[in-house]
Amino acid sequence: MKTIMLAGAACLLAPQCAWAAADAPMADADAAAAADPGADTILVTATRTQTFAGTKTETPLIETPQPITVITDDVFLSQGAINISDTVRYAAGITANAYGRDTRVDGFVIRGIDALQFRDGMRDIFSYYATIPSDPYNFSRVEIVRGPASVLFGQGSIGGLVNLVSKTPDFDTRGEISAVYGSYNRKELLGDVNLALGETLAVRAVGRARDADTYVDHVPDDRVMFAPSIRWQPTPDTDITLLGLYQEDDGGSTSQFLPVVGTKLPNGTNPRLDRFLFVGKPGWDRYDGRSLQGGGSVTQRFGENVRLNLKARYIDSDLTYLTHYTDSYSNPTNPYLDAARRQIGLYSDGSVARLNVFSTDNNVQARFHTGAAVEHTLLAGIDYSWNEVRKRGGFGFDVIDIYAIDYAALTIPTLDQYATRESQKQLGLYLQDQIRFWDRISVVLGARRDRVRTDGAPDTVAKATTFRAGIIGELGAGISPFFSYTESFLPITGNTLPDGSGSPLKPQTGRQFEAGVKWQPDPNTLVTITGFHIKESNRPLTGVGQIVTQSGRLTTKGIEFEANRTLPGNFELLVNYGYNKLVSRDTPFFDFLPRHNASLWSTKTVRVGDEATVRIGAGARYTGKRTAIGPAWTITTGDNLLVDALAEVNWRTWRFAINATNLFDDRFFASCLPRGDCFVGAPRNVMGTVGYRF
């Protein structure tokens, strides 16, 4: 019963569970138990996977003294997610696609601060424009950890992190194949096949092939992705999984960095520029890359109370990024060079990057008692990562009539013959003790020591010790208040002077106090209310002559509300709200993010006859206005309310679905910055899917 309740409670974090228990660790445990009362192994596996969010141990989320959101693939795919950023659109405290949909990278802002992306608990993104974005179809769930998290995850974001959990094999043979056609001539084939080759061996293959355009001319969004994996359990206490990935993207940049004056603001007597104007050179501008990844994990149990976890991954990435963008930065308030306000400078920028990454995370977990009512879960670990990036680049400059671009006349730069090289090594030691008193109160204490060496321009060594502490207790009636303190640090490469002669930049640091309450009155409801206060120090600031200072200190606070409810009659409801306020700053400029974010997503499933179901879903996402302050002026970007919809029919083993995002085609700016450029929000996108499951 305890195991069933644990998996059931986890399911509350995602109102719709995936089609396979192993892929959706928050699947309805009660339904699974009813279907197969002896399926204890499946329940234990699901529980073990979902509780890794935030603690790296098998801890129920209701016993974790911080808000952690887990979104299964069935949920974010039903919401029409195209990229990883889309998967977190319906989560509290997060601004997804803060600078518009970007085919080059995924971006998240958690509690007003840029967040880092992890994959299977290890950092996934290094450097800038050196990798292609990940594919959401390759992941069973997305985990959101809010606030500083360096104690367990090393150098990282102060606002939080997003962890992607790869699909892995289980011992149930099944599969699905889907075909998709959608807006901008999107054509896709997707497949996910799991084969049980015996009681101890299973394999899985996940793939996607896509041929698509985008809402910006001459910017494709093509992809081939194949992710094989194998799992072997030679004994009940040993679990070995190996994962691979091949992904190739042939694309471009939907972010065209158009000037504020002429898009959001009027430009004299000239008409407004097309929001989706392409300013590059057709056939030359592109964002093409290839990623090869290989990794694995080993879990070894020694009795019921001791477990060893080993993980490692290697990444080899190639990327070619060729682009043009207007010079709206030299004079943001009037970037035009002629009296008619039509001519503007145009940069051409080319970069060829090669990135290699090795990461490993290893820990041992021990459970023991120091009294009849005091249970400990002690975690001790060591992680290491190495990454190296080599880049060749080149720049050029033209002057164009932006209202009548002569694309054939645009020049392209010559790339440098030799590449720059920068590498970084991180070694971290961490220790965490989770103490459970009387099976009602949980205390978390953790500490970590990191050493990060960067070899580049200049060579630097950063060291940091970070701490975390938290407490959560059950008062009764499903009410569990909590309080936590967490810290984070992020090394910054470079130094204060542009010629490299200045002092090295200090690591960026942050600390957070957080208090809240979780309410779980029944297995079908979970409500979390949180208040937080974050202090960030050593934010780098670029001033006149590219001189960098680190006087940047910010203090933010806010509240978050997250509620999930499954009602009788297969009616599911997800409600989120986030409020984030900048309390103080000593920076001369800052890109303010929305003070208010809110979302509502709901689905209703109706059975039609004995072999079919109809599922209808709808959601609304509100993003408040945001104001950015710069040296020249202040820019305010208006708020927006977007509506998404789902219509789905499941008949026998067939699935027919239509997804629509930004259903009413609201034309809006995601952000406009005082440095001089604007980023456009994605227009309406409609996709139809035909799938077959076996």
Image (tube, grey):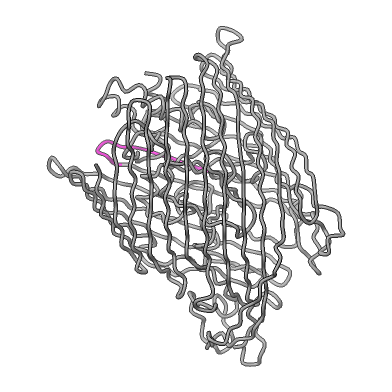
Position in image of residue 164 (x %, y %): 50, 43
- Give the side of residue 603 with respect to residue 460, left or right: left
Position in image of residue 541 (x %, y %): 75, 59
Position in image of residue 389 (x %, y %): 66, 55
Quarter of the image where the C terminus is located = top left
Position in image of residue 567 (x %, y %): 30, 37
Q: Main secondary structure of the magenta part?
A: strand
Q: Which residue is drawn at the image coordinates 58% and 11% (left, top)?
A: 369
Q: Quadrant of residue 168?
A: top left
The one nearer the camera, 166 or 153, is 166
Q: Which residue is drawn at the image coordinates 55% and 52% (left, top)?
A: 108
Q: Quadrant of residue 229?
A: top left
Q: Is residue 470 magenta?
A: no
Q: Which residue is drawn at the image coordinates 41% and 24% (left, top)?
A: 44
- Relative to 392, residue 152 above or below: above
The one nearer the camera, 312 or 445, is 312
The one nearer the camera, 121 or 199, is 199
Q: Is residue 562 magenta?
A: yes
Q: What are the residue bounds of the magenta stretch?
A: 560-571
